[in-house]
Image (cartoon, rainbow, N blue to C red):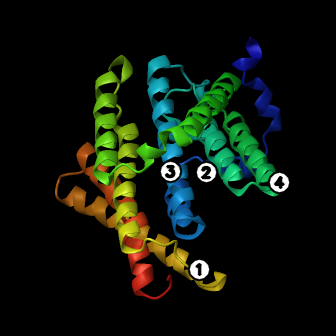
Amino acid sequence: MEFLHNMEWVLPLRSDAATAIANGFTWLGYTTFFLIALPLAYWFWGRDRAMRMTVLIAITAILNGWLKDLWQDPRPNPKYWLDQRVLGSYGRPSGHAQVAFAMWSLIAWEIRQYWAYAAAAIIITGVCFSRLYLGVHDVDDVLTGVGLAIIGLAIFAWLLSPKLEAAHNWPMLTHLAIIVVAGAVLFITWPNGEKPDSTVGVLALLFGWVLGANMDRKLAPAEPVLPVWWLCVPMGLIGLVILFALQSGLNHAAHALGADGTVARYAINAALAFYMTGLAPLAFRKLGLVR
């Protein structure tokens, strides 16, 4: 069907204001957003909720990356592109659409309020349409991403079911071993001779996340008691400033040591996540900001 792949219809919709809005929505699917959203969710929204969200995002990203390289479906003609960050990657399924649908649906389900479902619908629609507007995905890519997100959410719901409750309580080392084995399996099964470097990097982040969260729970088993909101704001901002300073410092150190390859990137991802769930909460408690 021509409509699934034709991009001419987006051109009359473009304007400076619309492009700015589309770029805003599409930013919600890039790494910087997740480096901000994930730690804030862990620090202020609840450890269990943030853990579920992070695991779902990781699973969704892995499935998306694997299928992209399996299908190797080309993106629309570059003459339509208003987002050059996609250079060198395939089209179907849209990662933005897939992750946005999965993540914001889960957030709405966790909150279980009408306004949350409405906000999730607006954000999901905005992110999906932004990829069409910016010309980097066609309708087929976006619909496939949404369909896979629905399937992924169904599988994730099964993983959270009481039938698998015992697995949730396995020792930390078992969970870490599963992550390592999953990374090895991806390297073995990755299709068409492509490399899963960036996707396995998501698993490295999950590794550090689980390690830090386990330390956090051992040091503070009870849910943290947060300060008043006007203290939460500078607390979150300072925590994020340190996170991005740590990222920059580790990247510069790896480059100076000549170790800025794939393994170094995995180590940096794990270190950043360990800071998010382990070191930052510890610092907040030591400073008396969280009880």
Residue density around tag 1, few if under 14, some if 14–19, many if 20 or more, within 10 Å: some
Q: Which residue is mark 2?
A: 27
In the image, farthest residue toward the left: 257
Please tell me whether mark 2 sits on a helix, a strand or a loop: helix
Which-is-in-front pick, marks 4 and 1? Answer: 4
- Mark 3 Cα-neighbour bin, 10 Å: few <14, some 14–19, many ≥20: many
Q: Are marks 4 and 2 in contact (CB under 8 Å)?
A: no
**Earlier residue among tags 4 and 1:** 4
Label 4 SS: helix
Q: Residue at x 82, y 56 (%)?
A: 115
Name the residue type under label 3: Thr
Residue visible at 41% across and 73% down in the picture: 280
Q: Looking at numbered disc 2 in the image, what kind of residue is underneath it? A: Trp
Q: Is residue 261 visible?
A: no
Q: Nearer the viewer, residue 197 or 8?
A: 197
Mark 1: amino acid: Cys
